[in-house]
Image (cartoon, grey):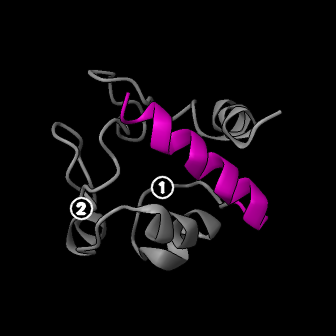
Amino acid sequence: MSDFEKGEKIFKQRCSQCHTVNAGGRHKTGPNLHGLFGRKTGQAAGFSYTQANQSKGITWGEDTLFIYLENPKKYIPGTKMVFAGLKKKNERKQLIEYLKKSTSA
């Protein structure tokens, strides 16, 4: 199984209840992630973000997502994302590999 496939499995198990990745996909509890890479925090049109998310001011990329996905509440204190994070480095890498392809297709 490739990293992409493993990341897709992680997304379906841990993320899909709150996020979608397809172009034009609807927001759920969390924002649609299409176009995530290169976008600043708190900027998905039509989603209601916390001030903490809007003010963080970082641009999403592999490096920032790798840190964020380990512990979202530590990286952006005040975020409303309730996900506890992925502690295993390989799982974060696999999820990012999936997100890179699925959010830009």
Q: x%, y% of residue 13? A: 72, 33
Taking depth in this image into account, of 17 and 92 the one nearest to the observer is: 92
- Based on the picture, tell me whether residue 94 belongs to the magenta stretch: yes
Task: Identify the residue under disc 2.
Answer: 40
Q: x%, y% of residue 60? A: 35, 61
Task: Identify the residue under disc 1.
Answer: 81
Mark 1 or mark 2: which is in front? 2
Q: Residue at x 48, y 36 (%)?
A: 101
Q: Is residue 76 above or below residue 95?
A: below
Q: Is residue 6 above or below residue 23?
A: below
Q: Which is nearer the N-term, disc 1 or disc 2?
A: 2
Residue that lies at the very extreme toward the front in this rendered image: 2
Q: Main secondary structure of the magenta part?
A: helix
Q: Secondary structure at mark 2?
A: loop
Q: Secondary structure at mark 1?
A: loop
Which stretch is magenta?
Answer: 86-105
